Image (cartoon, grey):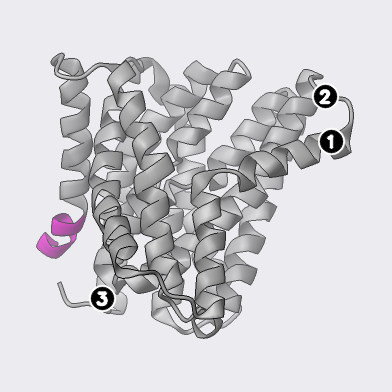
Amino acid sequence: MLAILNITLPLFLLIGIGYSAVKLGFLSLEHNRGLGSYVLNFAYPALVFNAISTLDITSAFIYEYVLIYGGISITLYWIGVLISLKVLGRNAVQSALNGLGLIFCNTAFLGYPVLAQVIGYEKAAIFLSMNLLFENLLGVLPTILLCELSAGKKKNLFKLFLTALQKIFSSPPIIAIISGLIFSLLGLGVVEPIRKTLTMLSIAAAPVALFAIGANLNGIRFRSSIKGAIPITLGKLVLFPSLIFLGFTLLGVDDSTTVMSGVLLASAPAATLYALIGIQYGEGPRLSGNLIVMTLSSFISLSVVLALWDYFYGFPIPL
């Protein structure tokens, strides 16, 4: 148990420090936006590129993971959308955002730092790159399409689709993934000064991101958010990872690292982008409430998955 707390507790202490920094007046939310931009546009892409570009992608790519994690993600997304529409009577925007909340993980800033301590940073980068593509193409893309169509902002579906794709593939993290894949597949190297610069940027990615997550939790009414956030939180932190584990089991995947990496990443809370998309369509307060409840609850979900991993399989890297 102490080994598990040594993994998860420092991450949530950083979140707590970020929250306290704004609460006590050492930092403003405006300053925190700068930290978030730095991580998203510089530190995190550097981390992703640095990790992926040095991998042998052809031998490291896990097709079972793509099939199961990707298949369950898109299936659960649309089930969530349809239940929200037909059973709960929500509108298209609310339904699309509910579907996104079930599968959209904070892989980069919570899932990846935890996973890297268990299986190593190089292996964790493989799962990170696959999950980022899943989350953006299977979650963010259809959500933007549904929300834009419902809001009546664009009538041409094809143009809307191209606009959404352009928005996704012009983001620095996705550019870093694609660039890293190209360098890896072509066997290209990066000159040492640039490699060291990228490494220096990479080191700052996780701690600054966790600090920024905590700072961003200020201004959200926690007590008024709990009741409405419980269903989506249970769906995200309990149902989604359970389905991922069931999928691997039914298809007979016996590599424990692949199975538990997928389950661990699925048990991470939604990323801040989830709430930011909601703000664009008038759902900011509700999604921000969901986000804070998910983030705080993920200390339990991540710890439980780590405990099960250690008990049944043992960690690949002794802690």
Q: Is 305 located above or below residue 247 in the figure?
A: above
Q: Quadrant of the C terminus?
A: bottom left
Highlighted magenta segment, given as a residue range: 1-7
The residue that appears at 38% across and 73% down in the rendered structure is 123
Label 2: how many Cα within 10 Å (few below 14, some 14–19, many 20+): few
Query: Residue 141: x and y, percent?
Result: 68, 42
In the rendered structure, does residue 276 fall within the stretch colored magenta? Answer: no
Q: Earlier in the sequence, mark 2 or mark 1?
A: 2
Question: Three-letter amino acid code at disc 2?
Answer: Lys
Question: Three-letter amino acid code at disc 3?
Answer: Phe
Look at mark 2 in the image and give the residue it sits on.
154
Label 3: how many Cα within 10 Å (few below 14, some 14–19, many 20+): some
Look at mark 3 in the image and give the residue it sits on.
315
Q: Image quadrant of residue 116?
A: bottom left
Q: Is residue 72 left or right of residue 233?
A: right
Q: Earlier in the sequence, mark 3 or mark 2?
A: 2
Element type at mark 2: loop
Question: Three-letter amino acid code at disc 1?
Answer: Lys
The residue that appears at 29% across and 21% down in the rendered structure is 31
Q: Quadrant of the N terminus?
A: bottom left
Instruction: Give the number of the disc on residue 21.
Output: none
Query: Residue 119: x and y, percent?
Result: 30, 73
